[in-house]
Image: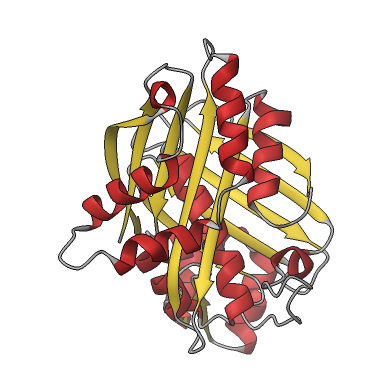
Amino acid sequence: MGKALIGIDKSKSYRVYLAITTDMVEEARKIHDTTPLATAGLGRVLTGAGLMGLLLKGEREKLTLHFKGDGPAAQILATALGDGRVKGYIANPDVQLPLTEAGKLDVGGSLGIGELTVIKDIGLKEPYVGKIAFVTGEIADDLTAYFYISEQQNSSVALGVKVGRDGKVLASGGMIIQMLPEFQPEAVDALEKLIDGMKPLSTLIEEVMIKALGRTDEELLDDLLIHIFENMPEEYRVEKIGSRELKWECDCSRERLEQVLMTIGRDDLEKIINEDGHAEMVCQFCTKKYHFEKSELEKILEEIR
């Protein structure tokens, strides 16, 4: 489970989307049994997708983030629905690389050179698809660039995942700041100063968690909002206007996996029936296994015919 809030500053210059996703990313880590580096990459993409899902207008609308590169992680994909449900996977959950010179997990190096694809399914005939080349592969930088290049939206994205020595997620969260049409130039200056001097988001989350005894998740998020913006001039302080739940949930089903089997083609399906006599399908998102007997495969083959 995770919590997210939406806020707006007093001058109506910018909007803030802020989330703590520690529990959600820890659940993903357990499901995919990821290395610390894979946890950091997948956690950032899941959090980014969840935050961008808050920008969708309808609960059934869907957003997909797909980071595909030539590095050892290969690709990370996450989808989010407008109602706060998020799921995702990393192609190589065992990826490992040396730390960067700054002593950080090298998410950018794990993805290498590649492309970010953003797909929005908002109920129209065709989904919206936007693509940009990686800026750094560090996820937040690429999402910031995507908003500017593909949506002409001045935004700042911050994402952080801190992993403990035992591999468990200690802190995870994200923030998107977006300028509003009637922004005041002074607000931009104040935000730039704030962002330039800001500690890593995972560190800020840890700092509020230290004082969190007896606090609910929502109160913790409120504390984080105050903590981040406490040094902003009074006229540009952020006020909360809403909150949402973000949670890991995979909506896979036997019926969906049947549809996948139908798409592999008649020849390949006949080969599976004749050579193996059964099939086992694994959901990429939640790793749940679905077993199909020979009689079931023959029925699917008849439907294809």
**What's the colour scheme?**
secondary structure
Q: Is residue 144 left or right of residue 113?
A: left
- Residue at x 36%, y 35% (from the top left corner): 6
- Residue at x 45%, y 75% (from the top left corner): 169
Residue 158 vs residue 275, the one in the foreground = 158
Is residue 141 something one can see in this rendering? yes
User: Residue 57, percent across and down?
Assistant: 39, 28
196 relative to 126, above or below: below
Is residue 253 something one can see in this rendering? no
User: Residue 176, percent across and down?
Assistant: 51, 40
9 relative to 20, above or below: above
Q: Is residue 267 left or right of residue 247?
A: right
User: Residue 274, percent across and down?
Assistant: 62, 84
Residue 305 vs residue 261, the one in the foreground = 261
Quarter of image, res 125: top right
Residue 246 vs residue 177, the one in the foreground = 177
Residue 87 vs residue 242, the one in the foreground = 242
User: Residue 73, percent across and down?
Assistant: 71, 71
- Residue at x 33%, y 37% (from the top left corner): 59
The N terminus lies in quadrant = bottom left
161 relative to 218, above or below: below
The C terminus lies in quadrant = bottom right
- Residue at x 53%, y 29% (from the top left corner): 178
Quarter of image, res 253: bottom left
